[in-house]
DNA sequence: CGAGGTCTTGAAGACGATCAACAAACGTGG
DNA sequence: CCACGTTTGTTGATCGTCTTCAAGACCTCG
């Protein structure tokens, strides 16, 4: 089951023709190992990459070697749909753990914009949701304490993974190391470690290996000031 | 001269029909005073707002009263084009200084997506550039020292204002108070004040009233690690 | 079984926040 | 045009969060 379709149908009804169109333009699956660079900064891809399984991250590197991850993508997400119109990648994309991916050529996307206005709007929508997530991360980084910021990330992933059926109650898998979490939150790995311990100690979460369980959804969301509104999960005509 | 058209033509050629279409769907100008809420969080606008003159900011408020500004918009920018597809505003928009604005109804935008695929792609593009800016801000907030972060903001505004003809050499007007700059950068106003002084003292900028002059573009960009690539200024077929 | 990655802990220090007070600039109305 | 109140900018002092450095434990996988 194509998780892109699951994700889009959560936001609006798709016609059979639209689903068929999506299925025909998506390439066969490809497996990549953890750490693979899916796209590099400065490249001009001729196709966009869709995550079918696993996690991927967009990142930038600074002169001192520091890295900032600006997005985490899960099953059903395009990691670089924007390269269709932006052309030059202004960041890299890396597989955070082993992934299955598929691709869609930019030529095919251009055809979609000519022949399927409604489907075009839904693809546009998915990039708008990416941007909404960026903004929420900015709020968390700028004005929330680090524990709330981490709590927020977990709340967000919990919901986003739930949409594509990758949660089991309040449990989900997250293959990121604490160092990678640091690169997401803009924190040092030492500090991430201490915050994780704090969230565990206060009974909000448990986190063993790559398995995370949210033990107290209400309290975690309260700490994070999490309101899923920004994920725009309503099913409406768009 | 419609600054939206100036901005889009910087990225791709517009046909006469497309320019005419844009001109017909844009409402007459409206002046608003500084501090006006252009859109409120939670609203469902039936039209999107275009800045013609002045500055506007998107923002979110936290329980403790803290505010984070996640985007600054200048002439030619839509402040909430995304509400066309997202429907519910996940943030507010405020006039940062007096503004002239115009609006475009969502019905008109939907017609554009049916009748003008290329123009649709350019409107989509403009939201993708917003997202690229969000990501660059995330990198700055997460992994750059506050002086570099402020330097980067000034470099970015310098370029973006230049695109719509609002710079005079390396000089431009910025009507934001230091407190508002703090809400952009995620810093306290006291600290912003000290960083501004540092940039002035080291001869990188001058800043008197709302007039900013970049005194040493090279050094300021070096400090900021500014690379305008993420603004996607190339004129190409999209 | 070894090696590299990951997690954990402690100690010291830096960066930026907060608190507090005052100066300067601005706008508004008398 | 001046008086006044409000917003904005400036400075000092103290405090806390998060970083850096360092070292050891644990684990996982080839």
Image (tube, coloured by chain):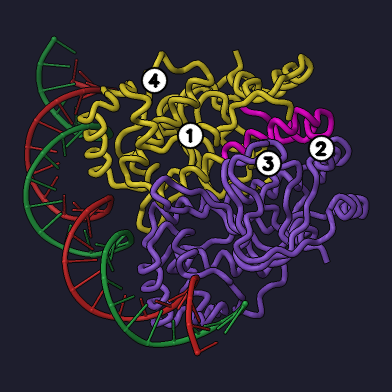
Chain colours: A purple, B yellow, C red, D green
Q: Which residue is mark 2?
A: A110
Q: Please state the horizontal and vertical placement of residue B212, each as a whole percent of the image.
A: 33, 23
- First of labels 4, 1 by sequence position: 4
Distance from the alpha carbon under mark 2 to that under mark 3: 12 Å
- On the same chain, marks 4 and 1? The answer is yes
Distance from the alpha carbon under mark 3 to that under mark 4: 31 Å
- On the same chain, marks 3 and 4? The answer is no
Q: Is residue A111 magenta?
A: no
- Range shown magenta: B103-130
Q: Quadrant of residue A107?
A: top right
Tag 2 subunit? A
Query: Horizontally, is A46 left or right of C13 in the view?
Result: right
Q: Residues within 10 Å of mark 3 (few under 14, many from 20)?
A: many
> Circle 2 sits in a helix, a strand or a loop, which is it?
helix
Q: Nearer the viewer, mark 3 or mark 4?
A: 3
Looking at the picture, tell me which residue is in the foreground, D24 or A92. D24
Which quadrant is the C terminus of chain B positioned in?
top right
Q: Nearer the viewer, mark 4 or mark 1?
A: 1
Which quadrant is the N terminus of chain B positioned in?
top right
Q: Which residue is mark 4?
A: B172
Looking at the picture, tell me which residue is in the foreground, B83 or A42. A42
Distance from the alpha carbon under mark 4 to that under mark 1: 19 Å
Q: Residue at x 90, y 52 (%)?
A: A24
Specify the label residue B227 is tagged with.
1
> Circle 3 sits in a helix, a strand or a loop, which is it?
helix
């Amino acid at each position: 089951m194509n998780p892109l379709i699951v994700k889009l149908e959560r936001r609006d009804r798709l016609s059979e023709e639209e689903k068929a169109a999506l299925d025909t333009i998506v390439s066969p699956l490809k497996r990549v190992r953890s750490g693979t660079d899916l796209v590099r900064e400065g490249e001009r891809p001729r196709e966009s990459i869709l995550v079918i399984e696993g996690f991927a991250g967009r990142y930038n590197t600074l002169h001192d070697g520091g890295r900032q991850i600006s997005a985490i993508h899960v099953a059903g997400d395009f990691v670089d749909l924007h390269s269709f119109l932006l052309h030059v990648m202004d960041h890299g994309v890396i597989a955070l753990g082993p992934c299955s991916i598929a691709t869609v050529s930019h030529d095919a996307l251009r055809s979609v914009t000519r022949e399927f206005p409604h489907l075009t709007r839904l693809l546009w929508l998915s990039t708008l949701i990416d941007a909404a997530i960026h903004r929420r991360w900015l709020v968390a980084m700028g004005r929330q304490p680090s524990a709330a910021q981490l709590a927020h990330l977990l709340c967000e992933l919990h919901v986003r993974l739930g949409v594509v059926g990758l949660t089991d109650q309040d449990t989900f898998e997250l293959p990121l190391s604490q160092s990678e979490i640091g690169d997401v939150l803009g924190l040092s790995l030492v500090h991430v470690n201490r915050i994780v311990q704090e969230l565990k100690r206060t009974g909000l979460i448990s986190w063993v290996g790559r398995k995370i369980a949210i033990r107290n959804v209400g309290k975690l969301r309260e700490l994070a000031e999490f309101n899923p509104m920004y994920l725009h999960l309503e099913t409406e005509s768009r």
